[in-house]
Image (cartoon, grey):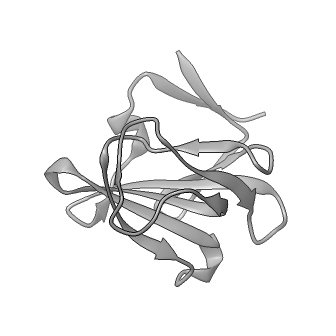
């Protein structure tokens, strides 16, 4: 069983604490459709479009290793973790289906959240 440690539910996704520079990996294969910082609250943002109208969203990135329109594969390193707006190393992670946020616990039933 896998766990997300030091988490908090924010907005439509989850913030996962870690260390600056920690590797961030694509959740599934897809195409990079956005890289930027239009949503300042999430810092440098990556959005990947997957099959069947799913999007995965990764925020607070420090170094980004993919480019717009790149095809990525599951578990490919796409970035490293940066700092959130309160200077804590975090990953903001969100999944959307047909534009609507979904509950990550429904998508990943084998993952449990533990707050420490």
Q: Is residue 85 left or right of residue 79?
A: right
Q: Position of residue 21 (x, y in %)?
A: 76, 49
Q: Quadrant of the C terminus?
A: top right
Could you tell me which residue is drawn at 38 percent across and 37 percent down? 74
Could you tell me which residue is drawn at 48 percent across and 64 percent down? 46
Q: Position of residue 26 (x, y in %)?
A: 45, 44
Name, please, the residue furthest toward the left. 52
Could you tell me which residue is drawn at 42 percent across and 36 percent down? 105
Report the label total.
0
Q: Is residue 113 left or right of residue 85?
A: left
User: Which of 48 and 112 lies nearest the eye of the viewer?
Assistant: 48
Q: Position of residue 36 (x, y in %)?
A: 52, 77
As drawn, 38 above or below 5: below
Q: Position of residue 62 (x, y in %)?
A: 70, 62
User: Which of 55 and 11 lies nearest the eye of the viewer?
Assistant: 55
Name, please, the residue furthest toward the top. 1
Q: Quadrant of residue 47?
A: bottom left
Q: Is residue 64 left or right of residue 108?
A: right
As drawn, 36 above or below 82: below
Q: Quadrant of residue 31?
A: bottom left
User: Which of 113 and 73 lies nearest the eye of the viewer?
Assistant: 73
Name, please, the residue furthest toward the right. 87
Q: Is residue 46 left or right of residue 72?
A: right
């Amino acid at each position: 069983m896998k766990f997300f440690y030091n988490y908090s539910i924010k907005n439509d996704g989850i913030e996962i604490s870690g260390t600056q520079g920690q590797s961030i990996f694509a959740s599934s294969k897809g195409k990079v459709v956005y890289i930027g910082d239009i949503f300042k609250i999430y810092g440098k943002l990556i959005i990947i479009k997957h099959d069947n109208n799913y999007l995965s969203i990764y925020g607070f990135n420090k170094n980004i290793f993919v480019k717009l329109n790149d095809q990525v594969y599951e578990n490919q390193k796409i970035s490293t973790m940066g700092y959130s707006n309160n200077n804590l190393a975090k990953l903001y992670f969100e999944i959307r289906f047909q534009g609507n946020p979904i509950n990550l616990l429904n998508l990943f039933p084998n993952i449990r959240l533990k707050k420490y």
